[in-house]
Image (cartoon, rainbow, N blue to C red):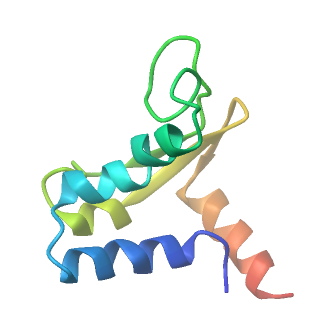
Amino acid sequence: MVAGASLHDEFDLLAQAGLGPLRILRSATTDPARFLGREADAGTVEVGKEADLVLLDADPTAEVANLHAVSGVVRAGGHHDAAALAALKERAVGR
């Protein structure tokens, strides 16, 4: 299993259970930050907060399928485009 892939499966299962796109997005962002007591530094995009981001090609609040439209990731200040992410996935699967 590739890290992160199960999260996308979970998005689809939550949608099948009747949750809407915004509710599902919150379950992966603000809700965990609140549960862990980290709302001051995580969970939303704001100045002074941790800045790891998943970049999407479409509005994730419009349709759950848009949560799968990953075009890149910003992690630890570095940008990884779709091609770089695909290469990382290939290396992980190849183990």
56 with respect to 89 (left or right): left
Residue 81 rendering spot, x and y as whole percentages: 57, 50
Placement of the C terminus among the 4 image quadrants: bottom right
In this rendered view, identify the residue nearer to me: 86 or 48.
48
Residue at (51, 28) in percent of width and height: 39
Residue 17 rendering spot, x and y as whole percentages: 20, 81
Taking the view exactly as shown, the residue that stands out farthest to the top is: 47
In this rendered view, identify the residue nearer to me: 20 or 80.
20
Question: Is residue 65 positioned above or below 38 on the image?
Answer: below
Question: Is residue 68 positioned above or below 74 on the image?
Answer: below
76 with respect to 37 (left or right): right
Residue at (22, 66) in percent of width and height: 64
Residue 65 rendering spot, x and y as whole percentages: 24, 69
Question: Is residue 82 positioned above or below 73 on the image?
Answer: below
Residue 11 in which image quadrant:
bottom left
Residue at (52, 39) in percent of width and height: 33
